[in-house]
Amino acid sequence: MSYSIYDIDVFVSEKNTYFGKNQTKYSFPNGYGASVINGEGIRGFEVAVLEADGSLCYDTEITSDVIAGLEMTGVYEVLQNISKL
């Protein structure tokens, strides 16, 4: 399934602010999720793949770590890829 930047936000499951950083968590029907962080001390946006239980997932074809330095269009591309896992 493919999502546009206009409808991917329906998968937002949580929003938090920690120490000057903003975090948005996404939960997708395939059981994976994502954490997107930006704010103080972060260049651009950081995206991490999450397991269904909310823990970081380090073994997907998308990344084995956090993806840093993204612009907003890159964030939506990664989110779309996570939703297709």
Image (cartoon, helix red, strand yellow):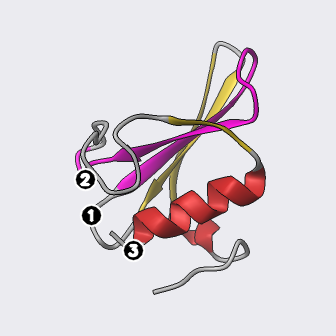
Q: What residue type is labelled 2?
A: Ala
Q: Which amino acid does label 1 sit on?
A: Gly
Name the element at disc 1.
loop
Name the element at disc 3.
loop
**Disc on the earlier residue, 1 or 3:** 1
16 with respect to 70 (left or right): left
Report the quarter where the C terminus lies: bottom left
Mark drawn on residue 84: 3
Mark drawn on residue 85: none
77 with respect to 50 (left or right): right
- At which x and y percent is residue 62? 40, 55
Question: Mark 1 near mark 3, Cβ–Cβ under 8 Å?
Answer: no
Q: Is residue 18 above or below residue 48?
A: above
Q: In which quarter of the image is residue 69?
A: top right
Question: Mark 2 near mark 1, Cβ–Cβ under 8 Å?
Answer: yes
Label 2 – label 1 distance at C-alpha: 5 Å
Q: Which residue lies furthest to the bottom in this view?
A: 1
Label 2 – label 3 distance at C-alpha: 14 Å
Q: Report crowding for label 3: few under 14, some 14 to 19, many 20 or more residues within 10 A (C-alpha).
A: some
Name the residue beneath numbered marker 2.
52
Dominant secondary structure of the magenta stretch?
strand
Q: Which amino acid does label 3 sit on?
A: Lys
Of tags 2 and 3, the one toward the viewer is: 3
Q: What stretch is highlighted in magenta?
A: 33-53
Report the quarter where the N terminus lies: bottom left
